[in-house]
Amino acid sequence: MKTDFMLNWKKALIVISVLASLLIFIGVGNADDHACIHCGMMKAKFGHSWVIIEHEDGTLEGVCSVHCAAVDMALHIDQPVKKITVMKDRSCTA
């Protein structure tokens, strides 16, 4: 009897682990909460310095800062940049 309970418990634990792994893998969460593809900074926290790079082929890359934008452009030198948009901090007066 005790052995059956342990087997069922282990099976349940495996199923829960697999489901949790799948949820993490597919990225369940807030769809608007983007992260920088180079350093992982969250847009929700660092939106004041967020940079959008638009390539000539129409693809967009969102990164957290000018530094990560430079890294992205260095990694993608084969993709010419059409436009770079930088979010202005609300506290700036210039």
Image: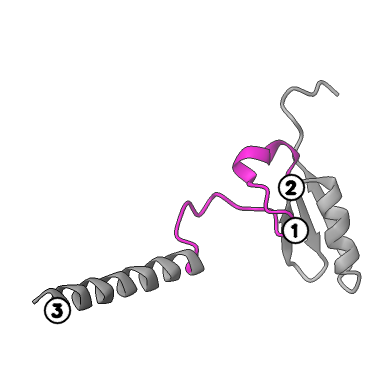
Quarter-of-image position of residue 11? bottom left
Left or right: 59, with 80 as reference point:
left
Q: Nearer the viewer, residue 19 or 94?
A: 19
Q: Residues within 10 Å of mark 3 (few under 14, many from 20)?
A: few
Q: Are marks 1 and 2 in contact (CB under 8 Å)?
A: yes
Amino acid on which the number 3 mark rests in the picture: Asp
The furthest residue to the left: 1
Is residue 47 shown in magenta?
yes
**Left of 16 or right of it: where is 50?**
right
Q: Which residue does the image show at 30% across and 70% down from the upper left?
A: 13
Q: Which residue is mark 1?
A: 38
Q: Is residue 85 left or right of residue 26?
A: right
The amino acid sitting under disc 1 is His
Q: Foreground residue, 27 or 54?
A: 27
**Relative to 1, is 58 above or below?**
above
In this figure, which residue is indicated by the disc labeled 2? 64
**What SS does tag 1 mark?**
loop
Rendered image: mark on residue 24: none
Q: Earlier in the sequence, mark 3 or mark 2?
A: 3
Residue 37 placed where, x, y %? 70, 59
For the C terminus, the image quarter is top right
Nearer to the camera, 7 or 22: 7
For mark 3, what is the residue? Answer: 4
Which span of residues is magenta-colored? 26-50
The spot of residue 55 in percent (x, y) is 81, 64
Q: Residues within 10 Å of mark 1 (few under 14, many from 20)?
A: some
Q: Are marks 1 and 3 in contact (CB under 8 Å)?
A: no
